[in-house]
Structures are given as structure tokens and as C-alpha cells.
Amino acid sequence: MESEIVYSVIGIVIFIVIIVMTLRSDVVEIVQSKEEKRADIINGYKKELLEALEPLRDDTEARVAKKSEMLKKFSNELSLNIFFDKDELREIVLELSKVD
């Protein structure tokens, strides 16, 4: 009986410590707007496209083929993204196609 009380008290103390630590945490959650998320996604795709095209700087045909392949991949990924509708998808792919 006495050990049950000791374990109960230890459990309650641990529970209180967890609650206090949770409430005192200084973690600030950064909430991005839809436009910021959209810009981050587009910038990520631009960076990925530029990195993929960099080794093909001298070979125009291979560069065009790789760019087309990457744009198709991006279009497919973006079509699954809830942030973009079909019109925005076209605008984004058009914007990405202008990247050299």
C-alpha cells in the first residue's frame, strides 16, 4: 500500500513537471501566409532546376531535354499540391520555363 502511494506521488510530480515544461517552452511557431508558402515552393523548384541544368551548360539539346523533363516532374508534383489551382499551376510552370 505504501509503495503505491509513493509511485502515485512520483507520477503526479512527473506529470506536473511535464506540464510546466510544456507551458514555459519558448518555441515560437512561425506561421507562413499562403503567398509565402507559394513563394518558398516556387523558389525551391527554381533552385532545383538551376542545379540540374548547371552541368549541361554547353549542351543545348541535353539542356532542353532535361528542362522539359524537370518541368513535367514539377507540374505533376504541383498538381497534387493543395495550394495551387490549375491556373496558378500554368503560371508557375510558365515562370519556371523562363529560368535559364
Image (cartoon, helix red, strand yellow):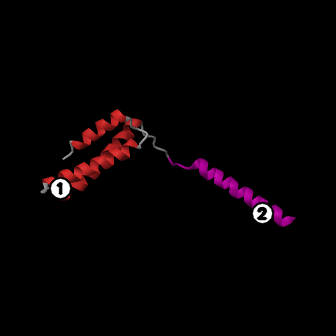
Residue range corresponding to the magenta coloring = 1-27
Q: Is residue 12 above or below residue 82?
A: below
Q: Amino acid at mark 1?
A: Ala
Q: Is residue 73 above or below residue 7?
A: above
Relative side of 39 to 10, left or right: left
Q: Residue at x 20, y 56 (%)?
A: 54
Relative side of 50 to 18, left or right: left
Q: Mark 1 Cα within 10 Å, few/some/many (few <14, many 20+)?
A: few
From this viewpoint, which residue is outermost toward the right?
A: 1
- Can the viewer see residue 44? no
- On residue 5, which mark appears? none
Residue topped by disc 2:
7
Instruction: Return the x and y of residue 14 as percentages of the image width and height.
Output: 69, 58
Toward the viewer: 77 or 10?
77
**In terms of image quadrants, where is residue 6?**
bottom right
Which SS class for mark 1?
helix
- The verdict on residue 3 being magenta is yes
Q: Main secondary structure of the magenta part?
A: helix
Q: Amino acid at mark 2?
A: Tyr
Q: Residue at x 25, y 39 (%)?
A: 95
Residue topped by disc 1:
62
